[in-house]
Image: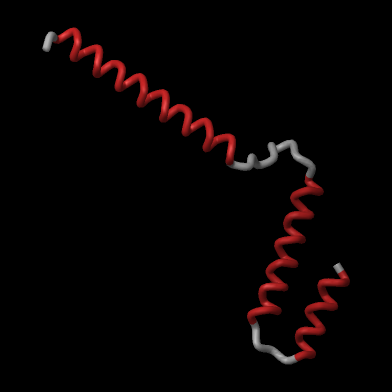
Amino acid sequence: MPWSVAIMVVMIVMIVTIGRVSREKYRAERAQPRLPDSGADPRAYDEIRQLKERIAVLERVITDQHGRSDLERQIEELRDR
């Protein structure tokens, strides 16, 4: 087999491989949610923080084996926010 044919086959394989890698990279970037820019609304960060705190309390309520009074107290704390 002449060298020119072998080089052409290698180049075709490289082009196809680079194309597939680029396509998958582009798909992965599109699929990931983007974080807000530094100029984002600070109220959004505050709301996210509050929601995370509420989720943490709900997880504790569900997984802990405390008495009913402790459960009622935690639920009331959530309502007061």
Q: Nearer the viewer, residue 27 or 72?
A: 27
* Left or right, 48 with reference to 5: right
Q: Nearer the viewer, residue 11 or 39?
A: 11
* Left or right, 12 with reference to 43: left
**Up-down: is 70 above or below 42?**
below
Q: Quadrant of residue 18?
A: top left
Residue 36 picture location, percent across and down: 69, 40
Residue 55 picture location, percent across and down: 71, 67
Q: How many marks?
A: 0
| On-image quarter of the N terminus | top left
* Left or right, 68 with reference to 4: right
Q: Residue at x 21, y 13 (%)?
A: 7
Q: Residue at x 73, y 58 (%)?
A: 49
**Up-down: is 68 above or below 19?**
below
Q: Quadrant of residue 76?
A: bottom right
The residue at the far front in this view is 1
Q: Residue at x 79, y 90 (%)?
A: 69
Residue 64 picture location, percent across and down: 65, 83
| On-image quarter of the C terminus | bottom right
Q: How is the image coloured?
A: secondary structure
**Up-down: is 72 above or below 30?**
below
Q: Residue at x 48, y 33 (%)?
A: 25
Residue 5 picture location, percent across and down: 19, 10
The residue at the far left in this view is 1
